[in-house]
């Protein structure tokens, strides 16, 4: 049973790793680099909080 | 509700893709306690080897004081600097870019090495339970790291929901063990007065207590990781202090129960060398139910810790890319899952490589060293924060009491811990110091030219006092 579990772990690892690589390729070819890297630190705070004391 | 929340956030940001604000205080608790709780299942007990069972208890409380200071200081600063990267973003705004770069590396090293240690522990625990010849831990290590990376890739909400459930189960197992051994009576199951006597309580004297600090860190290592969720919690000013302080209280209780049960069931000579103190305690009760419960809890605690570490290391790496301290390529956010997917994927093979080639002790030591470097920074950081922006000048979600006492206590205890690490792993301490010095030179003389200096300071704060 333990050996079967060990093989199953290898199988799951390979399948999920391949899925992530596929999704990574799909996203990078679908969206522009500017959009993917458009996150800015503290943006929400600038909108919602004015830091008035 | 989830769709509505997503629509609002997208509306604010227009075409921009940002991390998703979906977390609450329970997720912050799950992140912090999830990372740390594995330390009760293995790690803390090596302090008994350094100084005896009583030394393990003394460091439990003294290091608890260190981490209470960490939690209080962190809660105040993070409730104000609510950004992914946690202590990195704090350092950037309060100390400066070079310190921030170093702090981010401390974070990535501490969490990645802890993730590696967790995966090795999980693999070794399964192999020990199976007792099958030819079975190695490699497949279990690979599955742990890849499955958890996939979970993190798919979204922070599910990741920390899972962490909440498995951390709670592991925690409850400690409570069940504690009440199953009749802790109110000695002699029936527990034999503390026979195992810890005036003759063997401190076998190496007070120097043993100092040496025990190195592994006493494991009772609470990683609670500061809650701050990495700052950009993904709905209300950072409320959720982060609440989740972090609740997590610290939870851990202090778990640490005390763990020491009491283990020191009352095992002689310090064995307690100090076993890799599975709580699982062994379950075995020693003679109950198969408790033995299996503690076996499963050990696995769940390791999983929860590795899961939180992947989350935190990826956010720190992502933040470095966003500020151009590293190539901006790393700052990509997945447009559907809203996670820093490239950072998660980049750190995945690194963790796998270390897990397959490094030994558990080395990985743990690198994690502890990076953690203590970070705590030392935090004690200096809070002094500068209070000096540059005194109370009343900016809004704080939480104000920690007795300043500057917690910062002084934290700094002194960090110095003691460095000395303890030097006693046990002096060469690694020197090697890491040289590494951080060289990487700082690289950042200062080469990489910083690519940083857009005005863009990196994002908090809408008034000018600091004296500037």
Image (cartoon, coloured by chain):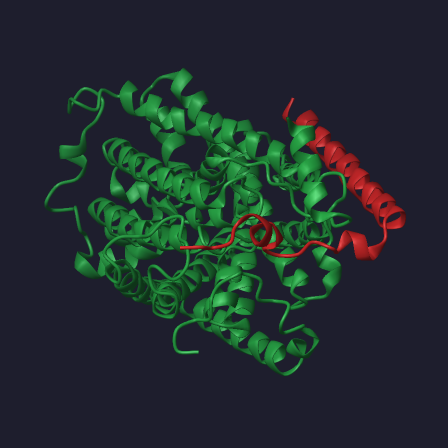
Residue A3: image location, x then y, percent: 67, 28
Can residue B115 be seen here? The reply is no
Residue B205: image location, x then y, percent: 17, 57
Q: Identify the chain drawn in green.
A: B
Q: Quadrant of the N terminus of chain B?
A: top right
Residue B425: image location, x then y, percent: 41, 64
Asked if B169 appears above or below B16 in the picture, the reply is above
Residue drawn at x 43%, y 71% is B464
Q: Residue furthest bottom?
A: B445
Judge left or right: residue B323 versus residue B426: right
Q: Identify the chain drawn in red.
A: A
Can residue B362 be seen here? The reply is yes
Q: Residue furthest right?
A: A29
Judge left or right: residue B3 versus residue B193: right
B43 or A4, nearer to the observer: B43
B154 or B257, nearer to the observer: B154
In the rendered image, which quarter is residue B438 located in?
A: bottom right
Q: Quadrant of the C terminus of chain B?
A: bottom left
Residue drawn at x 39%, y 70% is B388
């Amino acid at each position: 049973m333990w050996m079967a579990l060990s093989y199953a772990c290898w199988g799951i690892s390979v399948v999920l790793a391949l899925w992530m690589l596929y999704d990574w390729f799909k996203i990078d070819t679908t969206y522009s680099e500017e959009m993917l890297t458009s996150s800015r630190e503290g943006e929400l705070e600038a909108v919602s909080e004015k830091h008035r004391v | 509700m989830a769709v509505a929340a997503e629509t609002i956030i997208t509306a604010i940001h227009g075409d921009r893709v940002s991390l998703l604000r979906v977390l609450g205080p329970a997720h912050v608790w799950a992140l912090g306690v999830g990372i740390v709780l594995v330390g009760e299942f293995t790690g803390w007990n090596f302090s008994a080897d350094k100084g005896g069972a009583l030394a393990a208890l003394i460091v439990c409380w003294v290091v608890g004081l260190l981490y209470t200071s960490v939690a209080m200081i962190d809660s105040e600063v993070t409730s104000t600097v609510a950004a992914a990267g946690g202590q990195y973003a704090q350092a950037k705004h309060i100390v400066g870019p070079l310190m921030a770069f170093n702090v981010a590396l401390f974070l990535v090293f501490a969490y990645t090495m802890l993730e590696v240690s967790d995966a090795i522990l999980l693999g070794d625990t399964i192999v020990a339970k199976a007792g099958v010849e030819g079975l190695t831990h490699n497949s279990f290590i690979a599955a742990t790291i890849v499955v958890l990376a996939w979970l993190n890739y798919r979204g922070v909400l599910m990741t920390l929901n899972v962490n909440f459930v498995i951390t709670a189960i592991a925690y409850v197992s400690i409570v069940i063990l504690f009440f199953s051994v009749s802790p109110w009576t000695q002699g029936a199951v527990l034999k503390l007065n026979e195992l810890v006597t005036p003759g063997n309580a401190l076998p190496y004297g007070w120097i043993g207590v100092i040496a025990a600090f190195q592994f006493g860190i494991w009772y609470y290592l990683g609670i500061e990781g809650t701050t990495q969720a700052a950009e993904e919690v709905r209300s950072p000013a409320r959720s982060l202090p609440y989740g972090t302080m609740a997590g610290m209280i939870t851990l202090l209780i778990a640490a005390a129960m763990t020491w009491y049960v283990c020191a009352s069931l095992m002689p310090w000579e064995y307690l100090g060398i076993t890799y599975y103190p709580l699982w062994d305690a379950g075995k020693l009760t003679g109950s198969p139910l408790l033995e299996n419960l503690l076996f499963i809890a050990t696995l769940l605690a390791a999983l929860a810790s590795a899961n939180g570490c992947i989350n935190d290391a990826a956010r720190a790496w992502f933040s470095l890319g966003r500020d151009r301290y590293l190539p901006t390529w790393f700052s990509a956010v997945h447009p559907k899952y809203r996670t820093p997917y490239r950072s998660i994927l980049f750190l995945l093979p690194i963790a796998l490589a270390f897990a397959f080639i490094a030994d558990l002790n080395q990985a743990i030591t690198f994690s502890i060293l990076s953690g203590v470097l970070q705590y030392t920074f935090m004690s200096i950081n809070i002094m500068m924060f209070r000096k540059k922006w005194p109370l009343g000048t900016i809004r704080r979600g939480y104000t920690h009491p007795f300043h500057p006492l917690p910062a002084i206590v934290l700094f002194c205890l960090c110095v003691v811990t460095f000395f303890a690490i030097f006693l046990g792993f002096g060469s690694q301490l020197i090697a890491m110091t040289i590494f951080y010095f060289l990487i700082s030179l690289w950042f200062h003389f080469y990489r910083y030219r690519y940083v857009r200096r005005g863009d990196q300071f994002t908090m809408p704060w008034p000018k600091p006092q004296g500037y």
